[in-house]
Amino acid sequence: MVQHTLAAHQPIFNLPPVVQALCLINIGVFLFGTFFPNLMTDALTYKLAFVPARYTGTEPLDFSAFYSPVTHMFLHAGWMHLSVNMGMLLAFGAGIERALGGRKLLLLYFASGLGGALAQALVYPHTEAPMIGASGAISGLFGGVLMLMYAGGMMGQGYKKLLPFIFIWVGISVFFGFFGMPGIDNPIAWTTHVGGFVIGMMLYKPLSRMNIRN
């Protein structure tokens, strides 16, 4: 309990190593695609993106179906998309890594990203539109931050104290999903935000109890 409370009060921009590495990888991939468009082609981006239709027979099932649930998390549609996601990764990920450690942060991050992709596939199973971005994974980190704050006694007693934050996050995700976000031309996958958020909230407590050494 004390460890969680102290971790939550540490400055978020004193970046722990795993959060720093994730930021650098995402930025590096984006810069690679920006400066070498002849290598990061639209066809390759489509292969690396998550496409639900690959799993429902609308599109042929190829090898990209196995790696794209992970690789889509490292692609971004523009500077604004990248900046928003990296800003939230810094804000939410630093506290989680200090509280749980780097390995547990990675487990929460990728499990939330996969959960977000699954939510997209369940709601839009036949869509051929490619989905990219770390939004599902980062939404899971926000869910973890809420549970971290709750475990540290910062939100009072009773899970009902979490409901306003849950409704706000889900409401914002759905709003931007249907009406878009300023500065971002592509549609926002609201299902991914919600799915990742739910996974993050669910996994934080079990992960905090697991004996995983860094």
Image (cartoon, helix red, strand yellow):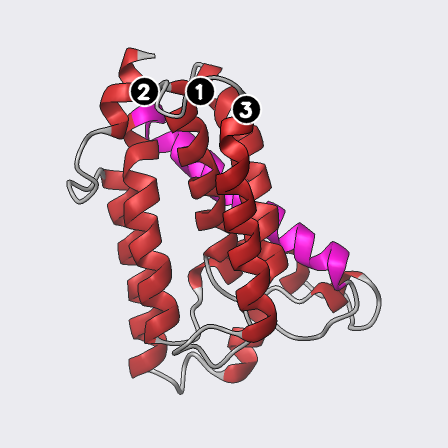
- Residue for badge 3: 159
User: Magenta segment range?
Assistant: 99-124
Q: Describe the element under mark 2 as helix, strand or loop.
A: helix
Q: Describe the element under mark 1 as helix, strand or loop.
A: helix
Q: Describe the element under mark 3 as helix, strand or loop.
A: helix
Disc 2 vs disc 3: Cβ atoms closer than 8 Å? no
- On screen, residue 137 versus residue 155, left or right, reads right
- On screen, residue 22 versus residue 10, left or right, reads right
Instruction: Classify 10 Å Cα crowding around label 1: few (below 14), some (14-19), many (20 and above).
Output: some
Residue 207, position in %: x, y? 48, 23
Residue 13 image label: none
Residue at point 45% right, 57% down?
134
The residue closer to the viewer here, 208 or 53, is 208
* Residue at the right extreme of this rendering: 57
Instruction: Classify 10 Å Cα crowding around label 3: few (below 14), some (14-19), many (20 and above).
Output: few
Disc 1 vs disc 2: Cβ atoms closer than 8 Å? yes
- Residue for badge 2: 4
Name above or below for residue 119 compared with residue 98: below
Q: Nearer the viewer, mark 1 or mark 2?
A: 2
Name above or below for residue 97 compared with residue 85: above
Residue 56: which quarter of the image? Answer: bottom right
Q: Mark 2 is on which residue type?
A: His
Q: Mark 3 is on which residue type?
A: Tyr
Residue 101: which quarter of the image? Answer: top left
Residue 214, position in %: x, y? 32, 24
Q: Nearer the viewer, mark 2 or mark 3?
A: 3
Is 111 covered by the magenta stretch?
yes
- On screen, residue 137 versus residue 117, left or right, reads left
Residue 139, position in %: x, y? 48, 48
Residue at point 51% right, 58% down?
172
- Residue for badge 1: 208
